[in-house]
Image (cartoon, rainbow, N blue to C red):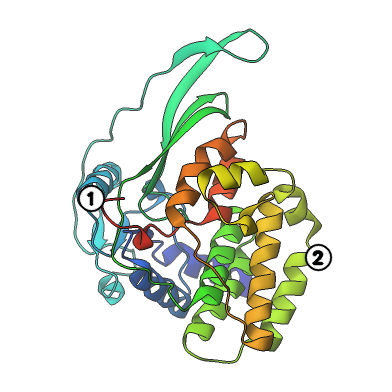
Amino acid sequence: MGLRERLRGFAERSPRPFVVSAADGTGDRLAVEAGFRERRWRPAVSPAETGVLVVCGRPGEALAEAIDLVWSAMPGPRARIRPDALDELEPDGTRRRGAAPPEDAGMADRADDRDGLRLDVLHVPLGPVLADWPAGLRLDLALQGDVVQAAEAVMVDTGGGPFWAGRKAARRLDGAARLLRVAGWDDAARRAAVLRDDLLDGREIGSRFEAFERTVRRSRLLRWMTRGIGHLAPDAADRHGVPARYVGDVADRLDGWLRDIRLALDGGTPVDGDDRDEALVSVLPELVTGADLAQARLIAASLDPDLGAVTADA
């Protein structure tokens, strides 16, 4: 058996847990991601492809209900484990057995599209149990085809404290990692996550970040995917109380993150200002309207609101 076949066999036998985080679960999520890298596991991108669920943090009632709904529809045999219990998984990815019937999907209404035709309008949520999605956020969408006609953002889980306080450069690397995974560039996402963790551990990342930054900035495909979508105009930013650094499209916001990280690493200059995470949530429906589903996910990733920093009564 050749090396490629052995690696493929190893990947097929390795667990692929699905990870969901509460608003206060950022620290747990980072530890789980590091555990995956150590074991050379790949996270599941959908709960439908795995029987292993890892819940990070302490979900509130609304998020816990959403997690239970996903858990009930996951294929058996299933295992639901704590972030510190990855070693309890068997080689086939299970720890305990169980099964439950799947939930019913929503039905579609009809409405006029922009050409005056009668097309199905499907009401679907994005989140809160979704890979590489802002923890605690649900985006309720009205879709015609795969185009967002209307959206409402709901914070189903908040509080727990701002994990990223005083760690803004690491937060930007975390946001970049998740945005790159949503864009389908897993290798660059992994590099960003390693840089993030090394920075949090106090390790030097200057030269490695330079190489990472060059790679990301030179990607024409990434630029093509992110340019011109999710454009935030200055007046909309003012109206919602969003900081001016978020003005522009998804590509502009990623460029700003890279620039912020570089400033912090070069001169010790902190990434200044409050991100106003609640304002980032409030502007999201306006930005995703007119986008398709894939673009909506990139737009949300480019704002990356931290609902752990939002008070529970917000």
| Left or right for 178, reference 205 | left
Identify the secondary structure beneath mark 1: helix
Rounded to the nearest whole Å, what is the CA distance between mark 2 and mark 1? 41 Å
Question: Disc 2 on helix, strand or loop?
Answer: loop
The percent coordinates of residue 122 (x first, y second) are 46, 23
- Please, is residue 67 above or below residue 106 in the view? below
**Badge count:** 2
Which is nearer the eye, 136 or 71? Answer: 136
Compared to residue 247, the image places residue 113 above or below, namely above
Residue at the spot of label 2: 218
Q: Residue at x 48, y 70 (%)?
A: 10
- Residue 4 locus on image (x, y percent): 62, 70
Residue 48 in the image: x percent, y percent?
A: 38, 46
* Residue on which the image places disc 1: 64
Q: Nearer the viewer, residue 215 or 22?
A: 22
Q: Tell me what residue is drawn at x 69 percent, y 71 percent.
A: 259
